[in-house]
Image (cartoon, coloured by chain):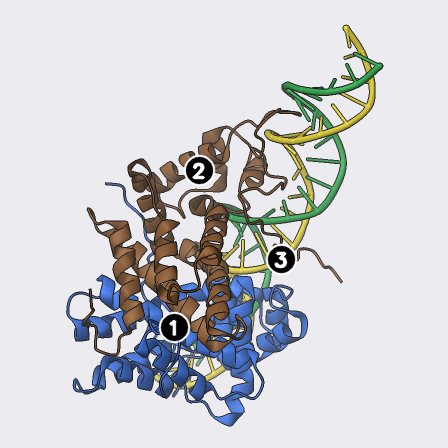
Chain colours: A brown, B blue, C yellow, D green
Amino acid sequence: MPKWKRDDRAGLMTTADGGSTTPAGRDGAARGRPAATSRQDVARAALDLFARQGYDETTVDEIAAAVGISRRTFFRYYESKPDVVWGEFDAELGRLRDRLAEAPDSEPLMDVLRRSVIATNRFGAGELDELRIRIVLISTVPTLVAHSAVRYEEWCEVVAGFAAGRLGGSPGDLAPQTVARAALGAAMAAFACWARSEGGDLVAEVDRAFRLLATGFADDGRDAA
Amino acid sequence: MPKWKRDDRAGLMTTADGGSTTPAGRDGAARGRPAATSRQDVARAALDLFARQGYDETTVDEIAAAVGISRRTFFRYYESKPDVVWGEFDAELGRLRDRLAEAPDSEPLMDVLRRSVIATNRFGAGELDELRIRIVLISTVPTLVAHSAVRYEEWCEVVAGFAAGRLGGSPGDLAPQTVARAALGAAMAAFACWARSEGGDLVAEVDRAFRLLATGFADDGRDAA
DNA sequence: GCAATTTAGTGCACCGGATGCCAAAATGGA
DNA sequence: TCCATTTTGGCATCCGGTGCACTAAATTGC
């Protein structure tokens, strides 16, 4: 039995770098050798290369060279090349989970969902340019589209858990799953549309998409509000 | 303006093996060297191995050995390892496109969608076992979840095209995109639920999911019909 | 000032998927 | 028999990713 390599990436943390081996996970008194760079710096260099020469045309070695670390070290900052584009997704997902949990029971399911998704995606004006680059990459480069699916799966689990609490039954049941995956679809559509267009408003797009979803498409798309 | 460099694997055929380099694409008079095996045989051997020892634990070399071809030849039958699990998806997608196009304008959007998705997924009793294996793999093995996203993207394009025709505007607009991705979500939820449970009815699950979606979730999930 | 400890970085070997290239095999037909 | 045609197969190569052993730099306590 060779048994090289199992997948076993089960251990995901809710907050960014939850005490793992990743460097740059320090705040106060720095003990051992200081980190040569930071996740941010790596991401900046990588995104820059991606924008200039394309994602698939940029090798990990190039990114590593650009920030002055070795290839091996790159993989200590990010688990994989696609992860650079996703950035601090884990933390964001945790915030979404919290918001959903804190919502009052009186508030309708879809309202909570729309409000929470919007709230976890409020970005400052300075962040929007980079966000757009990230989203365009994620939604157009096949390699990234593929990798992203795993992230979306985590997102769906969170939403399905919340929906199951509201609708009854377990998160794996059809209704919560349908709600979760449809909500994901709405969010993806909104983000992609925003990223592709020039001067749009992200929040407005997300809002529209979720209201469309809540109303249902039975009336052939004449949306209220 | 940076160039985003698309992958450019655009050349996908609608019918299985539309004259590409893939072997086994012959029907009548065989001229050159005969193909050593068929896509079906490769798929059977591969799925068998996947079921017994797991997807990630099965290498392409093992599959190739099982059907008695070389590793290199395997990649002529299937573009990639995940593609084996997806099988003849391209053909199915083509049929969906046709059905959507043929639907009468009088029929409501969501009805057409539900009916067409169900129609393209009617399987004989003998095919259900294999289908279940495929779907369980696709929806649980991370590698396959990832790869599948690219296929789903193609599916969404077809549905968005149809929705744009009904709603007006271009397929890239928010409304058609939201419809398409939400529909995809419903379909995925239905398939996954069916595959995980034992004695369920696939058609019934898809029907339920799409009706749920059409109604909208605004009323907190008390579904009609 | 000096070990011990802690943390980060590095080099190397190796795996597995995927691709391009070219030669070898197997067939039908002139 | 020789040729065109088509598939196969081996080989080299690329790239992402991982395990392992080892080195480098900093802090703490003596």
Q: How many marks?
A: 3
Few, some or many residues within 10 Å of mark 2 (<14, 14–19, 20+): many
Q: Nearer the viewer, residue B31 or A132?
A: A132
Compute the Cα span from label 2 to label 1. 40 Å
Q: Which residue is mark 3?
A: A7
Q: Position of residue B165 (x, y in %)?
A: 18, 74
Name the amino acid, label 3. Asp
Q: Position of residue B83 (x, y in %)?
A: 48, 69
Q: Which residue is mark 1?
A: B220
Q: Chain of mark 3?
A: A
Q: Nearer the viewer, residue C21 or A49?
A: A49
| Dot 3 and dot 2 within a common chain | yes
Q: Secondary structure at mark 3?
A: loop
Q: Chain of mark 2?
A: A
**Residue B95 tag number:** none
Q: Position of residue A32 (x, y in %)?
A: 66, 25
Q: Which residue is mark 2?
A: A43
Q: Nearer the viewer, mark 2 or mark 1?
A: 1
| Dot 2 and dot 1 within a common chain | no
Few, some or many residues within 10 Å of mark 3 (<14, 14–19, 20+): few
Q: Chain of mark 1?
A: B
Instruction: Check if mark 2's residue and mark 1's residue have beta carbons within 8 Å.
Output: no
Q: Position of residue B70 (x, y in %)?
A: 58, 68
Q: Nearer the viewer, residue B80 or C22?
A: B80
**In which image quadrant can residue A218 be found?**
bottom left
The answer, for residue A166, to whether it is visible in the render is: yes
The answer, for residue B43, to whether it is visible in the render is: no
B56 versus C28 height, above or below: above
Q: Secondary structure at mark 2?
A: helix
Mark closer to the chain start, 3 or 2? 3
Quarter of the picture containing the N terminus of chain A is: bottom right
- Residue drawn 44% across and 64% down? A105
